Amino acid sequence: MVHVSRRQLLRLAAVALSALTAAWTSAAPAATGKKTLTAVMQSDLRVTDPGFTTAIITRDHGYMVYDTLVGIDATFKVQPQMADWTVSADKLTYTFTLRDGLKWHDGAPVTAEDCVASLKRWGTSADGMARKLMDFTAGIEAADARTIVLKLKEPYGLVLETIAKPSAVVAFMMPKRLAETPITKQIPEQIGSGPFKFVASEFQPGVKAIYEKNTDYVPRKEPAEWTSGGKVVKVDRVEWITMPDAQTALNALQSGDVDFVETPPFDMLPALESNPDINVSILNKFGFQSFGRMNFLHPPFDNVKIRRAAMLAINQKDVLDAQIGNPKYYTFCGAFFICGTPLASDAGGETLVKGNGMADAKKALAEAGYDGTPVVILAPTDQILLKAQPIVVAQLLREAGFKVDLQAMDWQTVVTRRANQKSPKEGGWNMFFTYQGAADSLNPLVNVPMGGKGTSGWYGWSEDSKLEELRDAFARATSPEEQKKIAFDVQKEAYDQVIYVPLGQFQAPSAWRKSLTGVIDGPATPMFWNVDKKE
């Protein structure tokens, strides 16, 4: 009998999977005669409703299928997309006029009623900035088939910026019949008016998601820039292929069986950079903020003293060394609102950055009366940028005296399970880790986890009336100086209550074959319009 080691078995399995993938991906374009772009994204796609979750992969899916009333350019300036707009002299009425030629993927015309329903559904999502806009909104209605009127209770300077923001829950437009689905339920169809159509008949969660060019889409005439301008589709078909094994994905990229890999492992970048057929580049120059979120509803983290003890035990260096490895791509940062920006402050994050809080953590945990309740941590195994955080933090919490139950699962299971408000024994959880774009973290309103609305808020369900009052004050602030002072107070409250645990900032390069041209950068990447492929 021939004995084969586990390492050899894994290697053989990876080679076999690579061969199968190569055969499948190379056969598809030949069979269809279509120009096909094949991509391995940062995660498998399972949740397809872009209003239902803040998961980045679902947002990326949203940009393929749906369009927005307005977008942003490379200077963060709001630009028309589906609509132009005017603002009344008293700053209380915003009127949006839909451009000609807009159709849903089922052939029906886009109407103002559809967009009103879409805005209302988006305004009930977990997105704090969307919900804050609705707090200031007196009403949204359709004046006629092409005119949307948003009326405010009082002047609010972030109306356009909120509707144009590129993440996390984007104001995507959809037909009224879908937009009337409660935000607590997923929409039953993926019908948008965007540049690609979702091919539901070929969707296999865990295997592939397919998009075809929307031949009825009429792009704007301006050049494509971030989420604005002409979304000109230059390929016939985009296939997102799930490859949990990173080496298999990179083998497929280098052999030409895959065109694009969103998040190659950092330790494999040198091999890609030395390949003359591969581009390696950072598309999101603003980078990301990594963080941990505790569940405020259940023991032990319903006790703020225990949350504080846990935060004292955590340090950014251990996490970033394991997550990223190369200091070229990461930065220690205790600022909730991103280091190097006008609202940045390191106040409150000293132990996270310096890594000197373990002794205080042990003492604080003992004084808090921790009774040994296990901390259930959700640990994704298939997301390169999220594998390390739960493992590292679990070990740090154990060192501090916590009992930890580290539960392994794929990322899309985490995405689904983190919405469960039941106790850990009933399928809930105590802590999970994720990241958000730095551009989505810049202030107390756009920063999704920075909220205190309890069970109606973001996963973890932090309840903090003082934090909400401060966010209201920030929304009403009229000067940069006032905004900075309020942001400092928000950070102080967020650290005091451990709203979430910032784990530093990082950038993540993507890799693609040089046969692709026109790849767009920006804070919500990757985007597949404007991209062409040489056959």
Image (cartoon, rainbow, N blue to C red):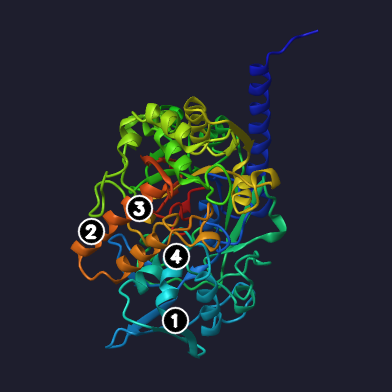
Q: Amino acid at mark 2?
A: Lys
Question: Between tags 2 and 1, which lies in front?
Answer: 2
**Label 2 residue SS:** helix
Give the number of callouts: 4
Is residue 432 or residue 513 the one in the foreground?
Answer: 432
Q: Is residue 210 left or right of residue 287?
A: right
- Is there CB contact under 8 Å for labels 3 and 4? no
* In the image, residue 448 above or below residue 501: below
Name the residue beneath numbered marker 2. Answer: 485
- Is there CB contact under 8 Å for labels 3 and 2? no
Is residue 344 or residue 178 the one in the foreground?
Answer: 344
Task: Quadrant for residue 241, please give it.
Answer: top right
Q: Amino acid at mark 4?
A: Lys
**Label 1 residue SS:** loop
Name the residue beneath numbered marker 3. Answer: 493
Q: Residues within 10 Å of mark 1 (few under 14, many from 20)?
A: some
Question: Between tags 3 and 2, which lies in front?
Answer: 3
- Could you give the CA–CA distance between mark 2 and mark 4, rounded to whole angstroms? 39 Å
Query: Which is more N-terminal, label 4 or label 2?
Result: 4
Name the residue beneath numbered marker 4. Answer: 231
**Label 3 residue SS:** helix
Locate residue 51, reporting x and y percent.
Answer: 55, 64
Q: Amino acid at mark 3?
A: Glu
Residue at 71 percent of width and 13 percent of height: 4
Q: Is residue 224 left or right of residue 461?
A: left
Locate residue 400, reporting x and y percent.
Answer: 47, 28
